Amino acid sequence: QLVFEKEGVYLHTNAKRSNQDTTIPGFIRIVERGGEPALEWSALEDEGRNAAAVFYTKKDGEGGVEDTNFDPGYEPDWAVISTVKRDQVREHPPVKETSQWSFSLPLSELYSLRRSRFSLGRNFLVFTSRGGHPLPPLHFHRGGTRELLRALQRYIILAPSPVDGRLFLAYPHDSGALSQSFDELHLFDDGSSDLVSRFIQDPYATTFGGFSKVTNFFRGALRPPDSPFHSRGPQDHHGPPSADDEPGFELITCGVELGPKPDVTRGQPLDKWEEFLDPEGRVKDPQQIKELVFRGGITPSLRKDVWKFLLGFYPWNSTVKEREDILRMKTDEYFRMKVQWKSVSEEQEMRNSLLRGYRSLIERDVSRTDRHNTFFSGNDNPGLALLNDVLMTYCMFNFDLGYVQGMSDLLAPLLFVTQNEVESFWCLTGFMEMVHQNFEESQEAMKQQLLQLSLLMKALDPELLDYLDSQDSGSLCFCFRWLLIWFKREFSFEDILSLWEVLWTRLPCENFHLLMAASILESQRGEFIGSDHDFNTILKHINELTMKLDLQTVLRGAEANYLQLACCKELPVKVQEVIGLVRSPQPR
């Protein structure tokens, strides 16, 4: 039984094959087959034949024999099916061969729909199945979105996501799941009870695996309902908002009016130190030092001294005598902690799986950290032994966090500059005070930073963000590694020394690393806009930027971003919070 039909709905294939159209005109329908409603799309050229050539599987474990030879016939970028179960296919009427892009999705298998719109383009919908697979975007060239949403609500409840007015979650009318909170949706839960241990071993792969399964949902989470970039009415609480005249059904603002991006120049590195100290050795003007470091970095010969202030090893107002006492006390404390793990016997360690696991992870990571640097190259290198010992001692210092992959990347430059086991350890603890949330199991800090980066991009370049959104990349999850270890893998070792000392000043705001990320994304605008990139090729392109970025250019762009936003008189409060112009409200 045909329930709904609309012509002029174009499917965006995102295909890379040169002989395929990027958009295909067709029909969208809601059809009842055997009492089960399904959402179907078929190409215009297929009319006169049954449309559904691709069916979606139920969740594994619901019976049926997997057909491992099934070939969906299109690029895996939009692969919406991994296996087909023969007995499930037989539940449906026979289907004739049709266009490779046609699909049929039972509404019981619909997980969410997302409404989006290019800044200067047409509206489109992205449907996602309960398996986490997004369908190709459907562009409504002749309107009809309101009617489709109304027809869908005959069979399912479309509830606004708690965090985004453009994302709607689908529930059956009798479902109790509607009361689930956002936290209960388990963005990174793939059914494995070993998720925590896998995150500890490899946060990159574990987190990115979670992102890849629910990219559409997480993309929605990146724009909360109270975001200044949304304009929502009372009807949003009860279902998809009704549209104004088609095709402009999306009731959102596209960004803020920013002035021109200012020209920014970098300064010379800090090359004097003694003249900034009083007779007793106190730093006379810490803010001036930070501003000089932010503007130009530090001469390599002075890094060993200045870094210990930037990372909190020494207080800015400490005298030479007080620093001698601090060093003596910190040295004793370090070796007390080092003895704790050094004195554990093999027999004891056999009964301590946590310590054993940390040791194994550290040994593995140390063996591959910055081996191109002469300080860590070769076998039996004393630099590697120091890396190992400092990281093992950090596990004694911070039992709750222990060791997580990526921490060796943070320590290596500190050890290289200080050339001292004790000093590098305490500099690491200061650095970890800034970034320790990045390594926590909940990953809340990482999700929050990606949210904040999305807000910045929405203000700075909404068209670029909309483009990434349309290519299933709006979550910006490909920036995860940048933020986790502060671009350690993106720039050369020497550049990282210069970058980190700039970031440690916390000027002009604590989230300057997010403005850095925005600067890099903006620099790739010409590569993305108007291209045929999809999620996979965007990810590949971002990864290939490693060691190809000019640090000073990125720093100038990041500072220009800050100044451009700070000068905006109508900057949304959420963006002001990100760049530190106003304080974020603290949870009670």
Image (cartoon, rainbow, N blue to C red):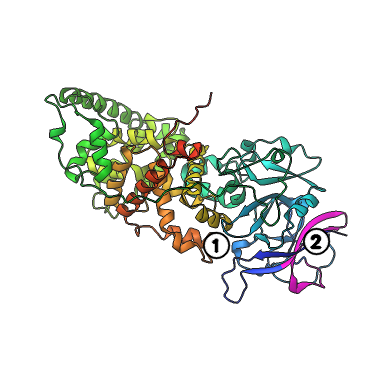
Q: Residues within 10 Å of mark 2 (few under 14, many from 20)?
A: some
Residue at image location 50% in from the left, 44% down from the top: 455
SS assignment at label 1: loop
User: What is the x, y in percent for residue 50?
Assistant: 81, 68
2 or 1: tag closer to the N-terminus:
2
Q: Which residue is mark 2?
A: 5
Q: Position of residue 518 (x, y in %)?
A: 43, 50
Kind of residue indicated by mark 2: Glu
Q: Is residue 173 above or below residue 542?
A: above
Q: Is residue 65 left or right of residue 318?
A: right
Q: Is residue 71 left or right of residue 87?
A: left
Q: Secondary structure at mark 2?
A: strand
Q: Which residue lies most toward the left here? A: 279
* Residue nearer the viewer, 245 or 274: 245
Query: What range is drawn magenta here?
Result: 26-51
Dividing the image into 4 quarters, which one contains the N terminus? Answer: bottom right
From this viewpoint, is residue 441 visible? no
Tell me which residue sits at (65%, 57%) in the image: 124
**Residue identifier under label 1:** 534
